[in-house]
Image (cartoon, grey):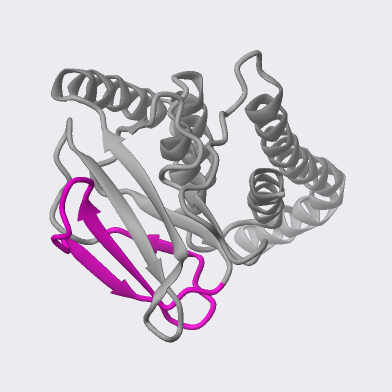
Amino acid sequence: MNQKLNLVLFLLALTIITPLHLPRVIAQTIQVQNNSNNNWEKAFEDFFNKSEEPPVKHKEGTSRGLELCLVSPGLIEGEGKIWNTRPIFIWQGKLNRIEIHPSNSGEVLWTFDIQDDEEIVDYTGEKLEPGNTYRWRIFDSTNSIAGMQQRTFEIMDVEKHEAITQDLAKLDLDLNKQGSTKKEDIALARFQFFAERNLWSDALSEVFKIKKPSKELQAFRSNILQHLCE
């Protein structure tokens, strides 16, 4: 009898307490979402409003009007160098194939046939070498070089590469200690890490490699590309 009475009292208390806590839970959820929105909005403002804005290089070769925009790597490098030895290629427009070459050679290191409307591709070839310069060329549906457009980029030297690698490992350790598990939170922290060092392509790689971005991150990406390719 006592057990049944205790159960009834417990359920009654739960019924009374839950509605009281529900508005607070909803408010906390909305606050988290708003913080996420504000974070990406602030990241965009910081990206283009800091004293040293991301430098945009003049396009190498010619392009077909505004149809193609090869963004990264190669368009927005402070010193023309990147950290990632497996870069992410980002562009706007229709392409059929990408080829990677050493800058001083016609040797093909890696090629990728683009599917459908892809505008982001992960480099999956052998790791590129620190200190070396490379170029990526693009081909259209006829397998001809699309407007002779290409980008060159350099992997930073071994010493600088190792220093960035160590600093990034410390950042990842700190994020782990703080309990950061959401991919977008980690991506935002790493984006800011690279942006502070004027490693623009590496910064963009962190936000474009998220496979299922939130609406806020999608808007951030769209605004970045619009700004860079306008």
Compared to residue 117, the image places residue 110 above or below, namely: above
Residue 180, can we see it?
no
Measured as percent of width and height from the top left, residue 57 is found at 53, 37
Residue placed farthest to the top in the image? 51
Label count reads 0
Residue 37: percent from left, percent from top:
74, 41
Which residue is at the front of the view, 137 or 177? 137
- Give the extent of the magenta segment: 94-123
Name the residue nearer the viewer: 175 or 204.
204
Residue 193, quarter of picture: top left
The image shows residue 226, relative to residue 78, as above or below, that is below
| Residue lying at 13% horizontally and 60% vertically, measured from the top left | 107
Q: Is residue 77 above or below residue 159?
A: below
User: Furthest-bottom residue in view?
Assistant: 142
Depicted 150 relative to depicted 21: above or below? below
Q: Position of residue 63 (x, y in %)?
A: 56, 61
Query: In the displayed structure, does residue 195 sit left or right of residue 50?
Result: left
Place residue 175 in its image quadrant.
top left
Residue placed most toward the observer, 46 or 145: 145
| Left or right: where 91 falls relative to 50 | left
Place of residue 20 in the rendered image (x, y in percent of width and height, measured from the top left): 86, 44
* Residue at the image position 47 percent from the left and 23 percent from the top: 198
| Image quarter (top left, top right, bottom left or bottom right) of the N terminus | bottom right
Residue 110: within the magenta? yes
What residue appears at the point 52 percent right and 58 percent down from the top-left corner?
91
122 in magenta: yes
Q: Taking 122 as reference, is 57 left or right?
A: right
In the visual, does 164 lie left or right of 35?
Answer: left
Q: Which of 130 and 173 is in front in this view?
A: 130
Task: Specify whether residue 229 is in view.
Answer: yes
